[in-house]
Image: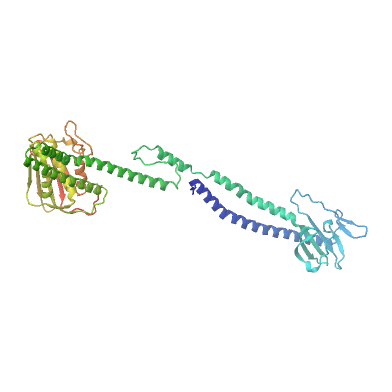
């Protein structure tokens, strides 16, 4: 079944409402005006009858209307009425107290004589012509009947019908023609011309008030869609960044196993490759967890986490990179455990990326140290290196996605510190960058509160 267009629906709805309202109102108004008109004409007919009866009773001379017939009966002269104007055709006849005819108009010749039973208003057809009659008994005993042809009233009725129906008959088609969905077409045109990735709100100049909620909701949905697409882009970039290291380590170990002639060395290389692949699987799971965190799906999934164990695991995971550059790696902590409330995968992403960034920027044979300190309220972790460091005026922008400092030759994508900041924000953690205590390089401090605020949410 073919669906009607919005314009057709609006047109049908408006016409239906108009019919439901205007037609009953027109019918009721017509009936009311018809009754009012009938009462008005009846009143005029009665007034005319009383006037004529009074004139006849007082012996008024009507030379223009009265003439005598050969048999001596007085009759009214023929009164011609122009049917092209609004004057009704009337006639009357009068009887004296004895019932003898005194006077009548030619239109009433052949009418039965009135009696006292006919006093009042009557509707009667005589000689095929419908009449509205009024009969009264005058003070001098004269019985007068006056009548008005009903077809003249019907002419007035038809005029009323035409007067009331023409606006409805003409107005409804005009309403259908004037009814337009032009604002919606303008909105469609604006949306069609939008370029992909455009996050500017939709603006429709001189929009009707009825369209503003639609435009506001549309802008909200477009913003949510762009946010979702941005999360997808971030997820893809995170995957490329986070999986590069374990994949490279697994490939190196598999190649070593393929070249090894000693069975023991081959088995050891294969075992290391299996370990790297297990870490890769764990990394994929962590990335998916971070993606869910970004969408707010795991805000309440915090638990007690040991930062000492998390940092050790991160260092072990980066062991091939540490060994390949002959980095001196140190981890200094004051207690066997450092418990905080948080999400393990997100915390692991913080320290793994900080350590990996430090390893990437230091020269071969350099130093990277991790120092953990804690008190009753917070735990602070410093990641220090003796690399080129970051100038103080550049430290506020290094957390931006895909940002890489000029003049530094690395194979990174500029995502590590961005991931660190996102994960830190979800733990109410503070990150500060300063010069390394060794006099060269960078020191990144992460301060995590022991207890997270339950009202916090991902940004």
Q: What residue lies at 74% left-to-right and 55% top-to-bottom?
A: 151
Asked whether, in this view, residue 27 is left or right of residue 51, the answer is left
Q: Nearer the viewer, residue 348 or 270?
A: 270
Judge whether 288 appears above or below 59 on screen: above
Could one spot residue 150 in this view of the protein? yes
In the image, residue 26 sits, relative to residue 229, either above or below, namely below
Q: Residue furthest right?
A: 70
- Examine the image and state in which quarter residue 360 appears: top left
* Residue 430 visible to the viewer: no
Q: Picture coordinates of residue 101 (x, y %)?
A: 86, 63
Give the side of residue 95 with respect to residue 278, left or right: right
Estimate the x, y position of residue 311 in percent, counting from the top left. 12, 47
Question: How is the model colour-coded?
Answer: rainbow
Residue at x-position 18% and y-position 39%: 244
Percent x, y of residue 358: 13, 39
Q: Position of residue 351 (x, y in %)?
A: 15, 44
In the picture shown, does residue 50 fall above or below 229? below
Whether 423 is drawn above or below 367: the answer is below
x 84%, y 53%: residue: 78
Q: Is residue 219 left or right of residue 388?
A: right
Q: Nearer the viewer, residue 138 or 204?
A: 204
Give the number of callouts.
0
């Amino acid at each position: 079944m073919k669906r009607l267009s919005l314009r057709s629906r609006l047109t049908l709805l408006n016409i239906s409402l108009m019919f439901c309202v205007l037609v009953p109102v027109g019918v009721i108004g017509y009936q009311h005006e018809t009754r009012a008109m009938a009462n008005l004409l009846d009143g005029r007919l009665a007034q005319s009858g009383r006037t004529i009866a009074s004139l006849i009773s007082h012996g008024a001379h009507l030379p223009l209307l009265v003439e005598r017939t050969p048999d001596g009966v007085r009759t009214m002269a023929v009164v011609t009425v122009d049917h092209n104007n609004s004057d009704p055709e009337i006639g009357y006849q009068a009887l004296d107290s004895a019932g003898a005819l005194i006077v009548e108009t030619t239109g009433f010749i052949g009418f039965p004589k009135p009696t006292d039973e006919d006093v009042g208003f009557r509707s009667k057809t005589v000689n095929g012509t419908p009449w509205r009659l009024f009969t009264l008994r005058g003070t001098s005993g004269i019985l007068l009947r006056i009548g008005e042809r009903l077809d003249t009233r019907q002419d007035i009725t038809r005029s009323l019908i035409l007067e009331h129906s023409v606006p409805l008959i003409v107005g409804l088609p005009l309403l259908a023609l004037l009814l337009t969905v032009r604002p919606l077409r303008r909105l469609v045109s604006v949306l069609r011309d939008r370029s992909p990735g455009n996050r500017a709100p939709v603006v429709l100049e001189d929009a009707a008030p009825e369209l503003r909620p639609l435009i506001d909701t549309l802008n909200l949905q477009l913003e949510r869609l762009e946010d979702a697409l941005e999360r997808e882009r971030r997820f893809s970039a995170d995957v490329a960044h986070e999986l590069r290291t374990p994949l490279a380590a697994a490939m190196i170990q598999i190649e070593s196993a393929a070249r090894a002639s000693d069975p023991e060395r081959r088995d050891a290389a294969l075992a290391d490759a299996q370990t790297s692949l297990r870490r890769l699987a764990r990394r994929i799971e962590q990335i998916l967890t971070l993606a869910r965190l970004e969408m707010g799906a795991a805000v309440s999934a915090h638990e007690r986490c040991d930062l000492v164990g998390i940092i050790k695991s991160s260092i072990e995971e980066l062991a091939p990179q540490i060994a390949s550059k002959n980095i001196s790696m140190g981890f200094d902590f004051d207690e066997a455990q450092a418990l905080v409330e948080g999400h393990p995968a997100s915390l692991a992403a913080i320290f793994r990326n900080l350590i990996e960034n430090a390893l990437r920027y230091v020269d071969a044979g350099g130093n990277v140290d991790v120092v953990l300190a804690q008190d009753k309220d917070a735990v602070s972790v410093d990641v220090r290196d003796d690399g080129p460091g970051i100038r103080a005026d550049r430290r506020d922008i290094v957390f931006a996605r895909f940002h890489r400092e000029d003049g530094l030759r690395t194979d990174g994508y500029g995502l590590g510190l961005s991931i660190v900041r996102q994960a830190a924000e979800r733990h109410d953690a503070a990150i500060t960058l300063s010069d390394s205590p060794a006099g060269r390089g960078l020191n990144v401090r992460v301060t995590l509160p022991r207890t997270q605020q339950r009202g916090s949410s991902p940004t």
